[in-house]
Amino acid sequence: MSEQDPFIIDDPENLIFRLNRRTLSDPSILDEERRKVFDRSWIYCGHASEIPNVGDFETRNVCGRPVIFCRDEDNKVRVFLNSCAHRGAQVCRERFGNARRFYCFYHGWTYGCDGRLKTVPAEDSYPPNFNKERLSLREPPRVEGYRDFWFISFDSEIMTLDEYLGDAKDYIDLVVEQSPSGRMEIVEGTQEYDIKANWKLLVENSFDDYHLVSTHKTWLDYMKDSGVQIRAPKGQGLLLPTHGVGKNLGNGCAVIDNINFRGRPVAKWISIYGESAKEEIEQIRQELVERLGEERAARVADTNRNLVIFPNLVINDGSSVTIRAFWPLAADKMKVTAWALGPVEETKNARARRLDSFLTFYGPGGFATPDDVEALESVQLGLQTWKELEWSEMTRGIDKEGEQLNTDELHLRTFWRQWNKLMTQAA
Amino acid sequence: MVTADSITRAEIEDFLYEEAALLDRWRLEDWLELLTDDAEYEVPSTDAPLSKTGDALFLIADDFNRIKARIKRLNDPEAHAESPRSRTRRMISNVRITKLQGADIHAAANFSVYRFRYGYDIRHFVGHYHYILKVEGRKLKIRKRRAILDNTELGAQGAVSFIL
């Protein structure tokens, strides 16, 4: 195999789309993709609800950099690189909290929560050109938010976040519209786990409905035992009970947009929620209809969406709402962080139902995610043959005019085309 | 005869050792027999170990029906994460009675659970249990079982696909 082999062979006229497996296995690709993909895209950093008050902060690693996601004294969301201007130590070592000052314990430099360098011990020993104004905590080149989802980019020239999200904004809106006030919040409790697989396999898996029937047979059985109809109707080419489509949303973002069959805390009752939940779910639906009208309310309540914001943010609005961001640790290993999202005004019962429903499917102890993890790790083990078995097939639906199903692969090809575009651009 | 007020640490230790042995041998139906029919099984998220189900996102927050569904799933060869099944070995120690409250016996224990699987590296889960036990028909039963991981994140442990 030569280094010149392309990452993908994309030839729709001849109904060919092949993915070179070295993109998932070759350790030398990771450095390049950090520079060309992660550092040239908008990357999810955090949700404004995680830092509701002045001085609140969360520390996390984004794009391989430790950052502080915080709220300054003007109540503005800020992001700082978590490294002292003096020698580089991290100026905040707590996972979360509230602080008006960030203190570097190494030599005692102190910064405000606006990032400005406030105090330097024994400052008089520095020469006259020492200028504290120049030594603020560094910010990523770009920080922008959409409906409380905050992103950063290390590419100062990148298009605005608004333009980047493009048609994905309507899908974010559909999630946020669950809340009467348009305010969603991250729920306490973070699921963090590693998968011994290339990070791009989780992109594919997060919105690949083709695998549902075989990988998640036990989850479908659980749904069936709970009175949910899981059989696909005959003669429509469907694998699942309801119709769903895959869509390209631009800039590598894509979605599957499905008619719900699995129940939704907002606002489709199934028996798992219990008889006592029926009335409240009906009220939630009524509120949606009054606020948004029948049609939009039905979009919010009766459809599921699995949304990928290129490259590594997933918002899945299915059995519940989960936000997932994930990071390569090595070519064959990623770190996943997953949160639950809910309306701020949700009642105690509705919140409990949302979280319970979350765990029927999602997360490392759920009835489905562990089997996804297993599938991805199995793929990665199989991909050790990448030098012999070079190509993966990704042509489902490629010969269809117009609409493609959620079980087709248009949305996967969308992701890979953007990835390929960035990787093959001049550095 | 076992009663809540005369229970000894040794009796609870014996009970927890038996439970661990059943789980390590994947005798899940027998393990179910150790639970009351309103039992709960919880594993909180690693960054919110003291949180309450209903308020916070957990890794596992099963009521008895969900526990039964979990066992049914784990007994299905298509529960791929545990098919083939992992080998587990549980070390239970530092067993303490922490509180007697009416019929409830609160007990704590440390755990160190190793998970082995063909083709995979060893995954090691460390933490402690909070139990609420009850005496039912002269036998100890588990009313509530919370496994709290010490790991600051699940990380290399990956999934909690078996009964922790």
Image (cartoon, rainbow, N blue to C red):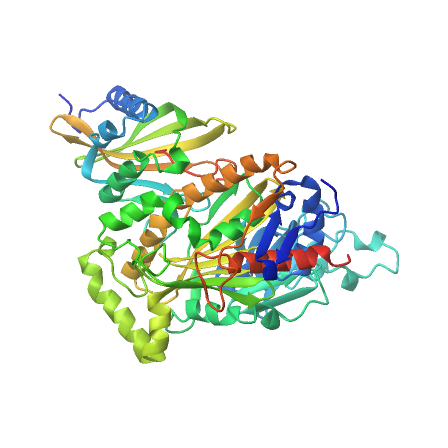
Coordinates of residue A372 in the picture (x, y in percent): 44, 44
Q: Residue at x 69, y 45 (%)?
A: A29
Coordinates of residue B11 in the picture (x, y in percent): 24, 21
In the depicted view, which residue is nearer to us: B9 or A82? A82
Coordinates of residue B118 in the picture (x, y in percent): 47, 26
Whether residue A20 is situated above or below residue A114 in the rendered picture: above
In the depicted view, which residue is nearer to us: A133 or A6? A6
Q: Residue furthest front?
A: A14
Q: Quadrant of the N terminus of chain A?
A: top right
Left or right of B19: which side holds B160? right
- Residue A267 appears in the picture as rendered: yes
Coordinates of residue A298 in the picture (x, y in percent): 33, 72
Q: Residue at x 70, y 55 (%)?
A: A423
Residue A347 sits in which quadrant?
A: bottom left
Q: Residue furthest right?
A: A128
Whether residue A337 is situated above or below residue A234 in the rendered picture: above
- Residue A83 appears in the picture as rendered: no
Q: Residue at x 58, y 44 (%)?
A: A198
Whether residue A256 is situated above or below residue B12 in the rendered picture: below
Whether residue A166 is situated above or below residue B17 in the rendered picture: below
In the depicted view, which residue is nearer to us: A384 or A346? A384
